[in-house]
Image (cartoon, grey):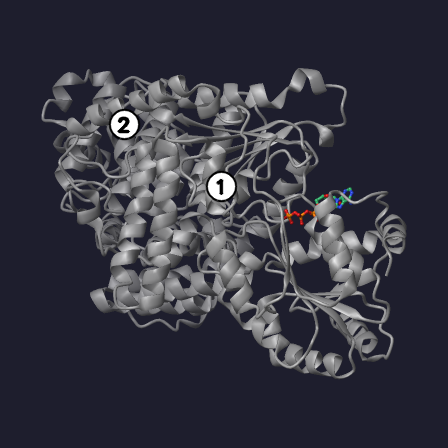
Amino acid sequence: MDENTVLEALQQHFKFATFKSQLQQNAVMEIVKGENDVLVSMPTGSGKSLCYQLPAVLKPNKITIVFSPLLALIKDQIDHMLALKIRAASLNSKTLKAEREALLMDLKTTTPNTRLLYITPEQAATNTFKELFKNLTKFNKVAYLVVDEAHCVSQWGHDFRPDYLKLGELRNDNKIPVIALTATAGVEVTKDIVNSLKLSIDHRKFKTSSFRSNLYYDVFYQNIVDDMYKHLKDFILECLNSEEEKELPKEERSCGIVYCRTREQTEIIAEKLNSMGIRSQCYHAGLKNKERLDFQEQWQSGDYPVICATISFGMGVDKSSVRFVIHWGIPKDPASYYQESGRAGRDGKPSKCRIYYNKADKKAVEFHLTRDLGKAQDNVSKKLNAQSAMNGFAKIVQYCETVLECRHKLFSKYFGDPPPNCMKNCDICTNRKVVADMVELFHTKNIQFSTTQENVDFEDMYGGGRKGQNDELENYGNECESDGERESKAKKQTDEFIKKQFAIRKNPKIAFIKKCTTDGQIHEALATHEVQPAKNETLSDLFRNIKKDQTIRKRKQDNQEPEDNKKLKTCFVKASELIQMEVEPPEDEGENTITNYFKKTNINKFSELIDSEHKSDLQKHEEIVPENNKSNELEVTKSDESNVSSVDKDVMLKVREEESVSRIEDLERKTEDALRSKSNNNCHVKSKPKVVPVSKPQPVPKPSEKPKVEGQSTSTKDINSKVKKLFGADSDNEQSDTNKYTPNKIDDKDKSKKLNKVNAGVLVVKLLNPAFSEGRFESKETFKSISRAITHAFIGKDVNDIKMYVRNFLEKNQVITSKTEV
Ligand SMILES: Nc1ncnc2c1ncn2[C@@H]1O[C@H](COP(=O)(O)OP(=O)(O)OP(=O)(O)O)[C@@H](O)[C@H]1O
């Protein structure tokens, strides 16, 4: 086929007058010939897709099968093709029945109309596809086999997908040309692609230099500025160029991506930027599908110029006006960094790629990698994987921590390209001296920090630790799994966690909880009472009464108040809390699933309702936690919690979700004690209760009034003594009477959002507690001393100040020892 015919087709079908580059044209012409296998390795945004789409269109009556890693990516491609009136389809679990039947009918005909059939590698391994493929090849109906994102075949790449390895089998007995496309084929990766996909020895290779001359690379160090968020904001504003682009349509204006290592970071940074006036969305795998799509759309349409995301964001995102890609913390390896930062400047205009580096982040990743390597000792392939991850990471650390060579050289080395002519397209080539000074300052500050910190070797300390390679990938928001896979993984984790707990505690209540969580049917379990009777009668009463929830809600709708309304609600809250804590899995992924799950349950809804409508009722109930309910001194009682939650309910909700398993028994005991105590005070669920109207919450007494709440003095004393223990014996002395904790005072404080010592202490403990549960504190003593130090620093300060400080503190210090500075 001559060049003119191909150009005409380019114009006719794709509306492009010319090829985007000579390389694109050469690749297309070679593929159109159909004589050889072809490997196309070109940077992101260079128009690789057209290299197979145009040849596919030029093969009438034949089908091009494209293997692509993500359903979302497939959907994008199909939408794009259909918009161009090129018939494309996919065969997957989400394909509607009628659509599937129509497609299969078309494929059966001798002259199929479908030009492109998109399949994930996992679907390619199914018998249905194998059968279909056999038939298609039998009648010579397949034009090309295209493997998109072919680097996924390689363990040396950053998106390794074992199912990609099986694709090589498809070409066994046929002569169908295989087209492999990738943006990031380093030397090792290229070898793997050729071997795994069984490309012919004389395959043709179309490869551009990895050098992107419009991208400016630099590194900045979080610890050398006082306010790193302000620095971030200033940099973003500089890149966005908003003033000059006022007249442009929103979707064409400059925008950017901030990649974060963890989901939590994406939310924190987005929140910070928003508070500083930069409209930002977050994006990570923990969001619901709809939220993710919405947020991506809002970024794409220019409503939100900044998206703070884990690396799950980006594959298939085709936005040309990305003026910056920031990595908040360290990327995973050079290949990942090249791929992620390469999303900037796809229109060829100058754009910036910056890493905001910090040592704590590096240590956190190192910890995971060292641990994975330790775990993989007996498994050769896992060991290879872990070693390769460590090597890649070491290279990116060197990139960040030294001033050895041009930033672009990292990539050219990795891709086996000759060194590029950077022409001052990185900080080192622009002003080596300034960068050297900055690096020195970074190291000096770190040395200062660590001499006061510890002599602990983190690698030794953590080597061979808890989790595996997958968790590490999770830390980077690995998105290769489908939603379904993720969910089932999360479910498995939850199940395993529950099993473990089961074994540890051999408590009959677990049977109930296990049933609830594994079946996802709390209400059914409650309603049918398929619960092993708890040994403790009070608890079993509790559960028995909970099932009346249905009745309560029904009556509430009918505006009737059941007599025992209040008690049941209280029980309900307790139970929901108990269950929530019991099932909380330690892993990120599981936590999300579980959290979402509970969000869906009426139990949670119900407890929220109570929280908002009957806080005072609840407070009253909480305050009768008996003095003999002595748990570990770090524990903040529910009574504390309910008061803190009046100061900051969101924080409490989150903390509640994150509290450690080790505290569950205390909570249970407390629950039971509280109920027992209620019983002693004529409040037991079995006894005839006083009627408390739902529509009229208890009036809150004025600050000067002594609150007439049963049991309050006990509770207050209890809490004060707990906090005294934690924050020093002088707690009481230092406080004026007006500063002393009382349940009602907290409402006053709430208004000003300023905290006295006791409440500041309670809040600090709550905020630090998840990190304590994760084992990030060297010891309990350290936890206490750090809590004390932070509390002292924040007495009388704003709640939000404490929240922000603790967040930053935890972000900066992955591991907290007695030497960690506050
Ligand atoms: N010949 C051409 N002329 C003009 N634009 C083109 C041409 N070929 C492709 N493009 C456009 O270039 C952009 C990038 O193309 P494409 O998404 O195929 O790149 P890619 O290399 O596959 O990127 P990625 O690796 O991110 O998937 C698209 O908007 C596409 O429409």
Q: Is residue 683 left or right of residue 65?
A: left
Q: Which residue is mark 2?
A: 759
Q: Which residue is mark 1?
A: 411
Disc count in the image?
2
Judging depth in this view, the residue of 251 and 768 nearest the camera is 251
Q: Percent position (x, y) of residue 410?
A: 45, 39
Q: Percent position (x, y) of residue 786?
A: 19, 30
Q: Amino acid at mark 2?
A: Asn
Q: Quadrant of residue 360 in the image?
A: top left
Q: Quadrant of residue 661 in the image?
A: bottom left
Q: Percent position (x, y) of residue 429?
A: 47, 24
Judging depth in this view, the residue of 582 and 161 nearest the camera is 161
* Label 1: which secondary element: helix
Q: Name above or below for residue 695 compared with residue 480.
A: above
Q: Earlier in the sequence, mark 1 or mark 2?
A: 1
Q: Percent position (x, y) of residue 308?
A: 52, 36
Judging depth in this view, the residue of 455 and 819 nearest the camera is 455
**Label 2 CB sits under 8 Å from any ligand 1 atom:** no
Q: Quadrant of residue 237 in the image?
A: top right
Quadrant the N terminus occupies: bottom right
Q: Name above or below for residue 552 compared with residue 194.
A: above
Q: Which mark is residue 702?
A: none
Judging depth in this view, the residue of 568 and 356 nearest the camera is 356
Residue drawn at 79 percent across, 72 percent down:
103
Q: Is residue 545 left or right of residue 420?
A: left
Residues at marks 1 and 2, CA–CA distance in whole angstroms: 52 Å
| Residue 36 seen | yes
Ligand 1 - quadrant of the structure image: top right
Q: Amino acid at mark 1?
A: Phe
Residue drawn at 64 percent across, 43 percent down:
294
